[in-house]
Amino acid sequence: MIDFLIIGGGVAGASAAARLSTLGSVVLLEGEDALAYHTSGRSAALFEQNYGKPSTVALNSASHAFHDAQGILSPRGLMLVGSQDMADEFADDQKHMQLDSLTIQEAKDMVPILNDTVVDRAAFHTSAWDMDTDKLIQTFARMARENGAIIHTKAQVDGITKTDSGWAVSAGTNDFAARNLVNAAGAWVDQIAELAGVAPLGFTPLRRSMARIPAPGGHDVSGWPMIFGPGEDWYAKPDAGALLVSPAEEDLTTPHDAYTDDMVLAEGLARYEAHVTEPVTRLLSSWAGLRTFAPDRSLVLGPDVRDPSFIWCAGQGGYGMQSAPAASQLLADLVSGAASELGRDIVAALSPQRFG
């Protein structure tokens, strides 16, 4: 009998496996060929501590030391640029992300392609880092395996039954028996809940697209910060000598292997182009991922209200990579009954019990 059977091998499932494997036997089931195939493998890979709801910011803050100790972070910085027509959105973002004002010349010294006939305000801070997301996933997987956890890929769950002792789960020709079921299935968490006979919580998968373009004007972009438009209606980030540009859309969709909408991508690239002097002439590649949120956009961590043996690790949205160390530790604390280092109000804001 397995103590914890985890469904989902993105950053939520891998981090849960690392933490829960210190409490008992763990088996993780991932339907794809490799861990982090879907959204976790398509992340913008930025650690920005002040990004998200207050409960997410608390998780981000509590995760920083882990990321730093494991060598996950490297310097990047974050710049916000805007114009008079979005002054209110700019001011809100600058305050929320605690950015210092820059002169336009200072901003252009960092990012020479900024169009100063459009951009009339900028703000910046150094407290944003690139994340080695593959290293993070592999770190969690290594921690789990060192504690005896077993990770199965190509293990698509197709049946879940409640038993007297816990759960019976089938994945193709393989059957598993577990005391506790951990739902870390990303965009599919409500589907897994329904398969298990547990009430879904109303998660919404939202598509976000990304384009990879050549370095604008042949510039060396390696030292550029990540650049946001006000209200996060586009962003750009250096990536291995090229530039990632996203429309930052949140289009409601269904759980699936996401792909870009060409029109949405084109509109986002146009918003980016309006702020710079170098046009986008071609794409190197493009892709999309699903950012899945609970109704209140905070993560959902802990035992289900009606069945404590069904454990939620869900709703990471766009914050899964940066919040995973603290989120998974909280999950383990809740399961073991240990005191969490997070405040009671934060724990309550993340608990499935807030849904009644």
Image: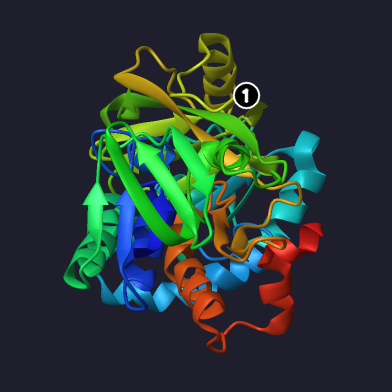
Q: Is residue 126 left or right of residue 234?
A: left
Amino acid type of the residue tagged 1 in the rendering: Thr
Q: Is residue 277 left or right of residue 23?
A: right
Quadrant location of the N terminus in the rendered image: bottom left
**Residue beneath the point at 43% across and 24% down:** 257
Would you say residue 223 is visible in this rendering? no
Which coloring applies here?
rainbow
Residue 166: percent from the left, percent from the top? 50, 60
Label 1 element class: loop
Residue 321: percent from the left, percent from the top? 43, 55
Quadrant location of the C terminus in the rendered image: bottom right
* Residue holding disc 1: 253
Q: Is residue 46 left or right of residue 80?
A: left
Task: Between residue 248 and residue 142, name the one nearer to us.
Answer: 142
**Residue beneath the point at 36% across and 75% down:** 66
**Residue beneath the point at 76% across and 53% down:** 91
**Residue beneath the point at 57% across and 44% down:** 196
- Considering only vertical position in the picture, is 44 above or below 250? below
Would you say residue 75 is visible in this rendering? yes
Q: Quadrant of residue 37?
A: top left
Task: Between residue 321 and residue 130, name the one nearer to us.
Answer: 321
- Considering only vertical position in the picture, is 68 above or below 101? below
Residue 282: percent from the left, percent from the top? 35, 13
